[in-house]
Amino acid sequence: MTAKILQAKDMAKCIGCYSCMMACARTTRRSLSPTKAALQIRTAGGLQSKLIADICRGCIDAPCAEACRCGALLPREGGGVRFITHKCLGCGDCVEACIIGVLEFDYDNQKPLVCVQCGTCVRFCPHQVLTMEERLV
Amino acid sequence: MTATNIKVLDINLSEEKIEIQHREDLAPLLGGIGLASKLFAEKVNPELDPLAEEQPVVLANGPLSTIFPVVTKVVSVFRSPLTGEWGESYAGMRLALAMRLAGYQAIVIHGKAKRPTYLAIGPHGVQFKNASALWGLTVGETGTILRRILPGSGHRSTIRIGPAGEKCVSFANVNVDTYRHFGRLGMGAVFGAKNLKAVVIYGDKDEPVADIKAYNKVYKDIYQRVVSTDIMEKYHGVGTAINVNALNNLGGLPTKNLQSGKFDSANEISGEAFAEHCLIRKMACSGCPVGCIHIGLRRREFGPGYEYESKSISYDHELIFAMGSYLGISSRDKVLDLIDAVEELGLDAMTAGVALGWVTEAYKNGIVDEVTLGTKVQFDDTKGYIEVLKNIVYPQNSFYTELAKGTAAVAEKYGGKEYALTLAKTEIAGYHTGHANILGQTVGARHSHLDNAGYSVDQKNKDQKDLEKMVESIIEEEKWRNVLNCLCICLFARGIYDHQTVVSALNSIGIETNEEELNTLGEEIFKLKQQMRSKLGYNLGQLEFPKRFYETPSLTGKINEETLNKMLEIYKSRSQESESGSQNG
């Protein structure tokens, strides 16, 4: 079976509750702050505008992993990366390498906010906007 | 209760100075209304006018804000220019989140800026910015410009006033992130009097979880109850507007300045009709998986040759009542046009609707003529109403100056008090359910149906016989809601957050408490508010009920003057008992 990748195909259905960010932050970072989440839901320009999902797209041969020289980010089979936290030195090269600019750097911890495609956010999406799906090939 | 760090941001507009205060002494109040009431009491000067520059406006959230489902509100406390007494209002959207990310539990704003100003509040300071270019702009335009020039895009909160606030209309609101408001009691005028056009709050503060296991468990339990049971469904489905048909069918929907409790065209403007024909999306406040904010589309032809514009407008039961049935408005488009008008001017919709209702009858009865009004007005005619709304904000004569002070003030001077539907100088909400509703709004701290849910007490006591019990329910409910409001839980989730749930949530983040302590807190705040209200001029002995209440049958039948006065007497003795009881205890 191929690995599943986070998707946000139906953002028009998103109500902007931010439950996904809260879930990600508390689960992966033990933080109460949605700014520590590895995905960011935001408005494009005020609340009359569209809601946008800045999520890791689970690249095959992920450029962030390619840019990592200390072995902390490893390509994951089927797309995306694994993150070996203790190996990360906090250089930020991965953040620079993300081609869609969704990988954020956490300056409090000096580590990138890596999405490891765990699917926790999906379990706290009340409207099934976020899904985990196998990549179509 | 364990002390938590209460960080208060004090902003002095006159001197452009700020101060961070750590108020551990206020931790037993938890936050929200408890914290705001105390901070307000410390700073308010009862001798001075509500719009005097010294008067404070306090914003506060609570320890559970945003980190538990549906805990989304921020409370504001100020001296109301509409009533002269206690001003208390709640708003959602992103403000609670932004305050939390900026690291403040409360913000106190006092003084008066030398020129039009907006504040940019971040985790590392406050900027006092020149708002000259924004002064005079509508709520929408102001938001658009601020979004473009300030940082924090995506998760910040922008609260601002429209022209009504600038001109100190007594029922001007403060708009919160386009779709929510500090609506009632005139906080917008307090901003305007301080030369304060807007406050933008943003931040990125990290907050580690102390006991992740305990927190996760309680969070998940509450989240599941919110999304998987039917407790919250009515708020997400049709939304609060489901009340329009429900109340109308029972004869409790205030219609045409409360000439009736039933509206012929209710079907046209019901929640179901809005959902089927206008609803384009639903939105949520940050941290709420329900999403009760219903956005309707108004598509409007503005010129020949298929010239169309469209606008996304938020609607709710109270708006459909105030800008709909109360003014005999028979179509959804017309309701949306009136909502749009008050939104852009920055007027509270409920207050404005009730004021327009009075104007309609005053005009018909010859109290005010077409020349003074600058237009004709009649039920179901939006053109005249929009003209009047503009004139309230930009008054050209003394009639409008008086109208801008509210329905009670204008009727006091010009007459027609018997159909000026205010309770303790506050315009009524969209329920005509019976005696408990009228009493509840009259005695409630902010004269809101949400203070103590009198409308619900009526529906549980359809025979309206056991007056003691009804008054008791009103008092008990107001005390418990004080607790919920210390935590700034959205009151729509009151069915989720029972005593035990509140205790579990607080315990899971390290605040030790129990049900008894919470009840004592509710009692204490009830008492504190009673004291403050008396100091500011609220007087139970001077209350009057407009005659119209006795003429129009309610959902539970005819309103009886004697019954109402009896209930008021019971309330007086019970609420005093509560005061002396807690003084002795």
Image (cartoon, rainbow, N blue to C red):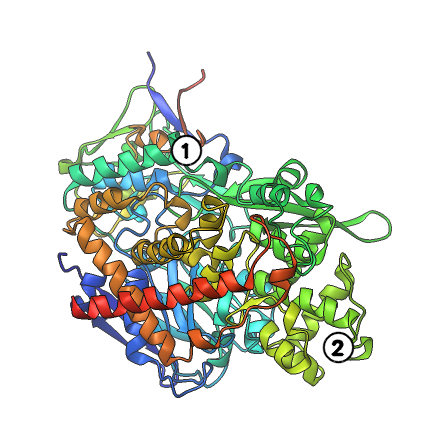
Image coordinates for residue B102, horizontal then vertical, percent: 31, 60
Residue lying at 68% horizontally and 38% vertically, measured from the top left: B277
Relative to B24, residue A107 above or below: above
Corner quadrant of residue B142: bottom right
Q: Position of residue B297 (x, y in %)?
A: 65, 45
Please say if B15 is above or below B530.
Answer: below
Amino acid tagged 1? Pro
Q: Residue at x 41, y 58 (%)?
A: B451
Q: Is residue A133 above or below residue B375?
A: above
Locate residue A38, reporting x and y percent.
31, 39
Q: Disc 1 designates what residue?
A: A126
Picture quarter containing residue A73?
top left
Report if residue B177 is visible in the image: no
> Residue visible at 34% across and 41% down?
B496
Chain for mark 2? B
Disc 1 crowd, CA 10 A, few/some/many (<14, 14-19, 20+): many
Q: Secondary structure at mark 2?
A: loop
- Disc 2 residue crowd, few under 14, some 14–19, many 20+, Cα 10 Å: few
Query: Is B486 on the left-hand or right-hand side of B437?
Result: left
Residue drawn at (21%, 46%) of the image: B503
Name the residue carrying label 2: B367
Q: Nearer the viewer, residue B96 or B518?
A: B518
The answer for how far apart the CA atoms under marks 1 and 2 are is 54 Å
Q: Secondary structure at mark 1?
A: loop
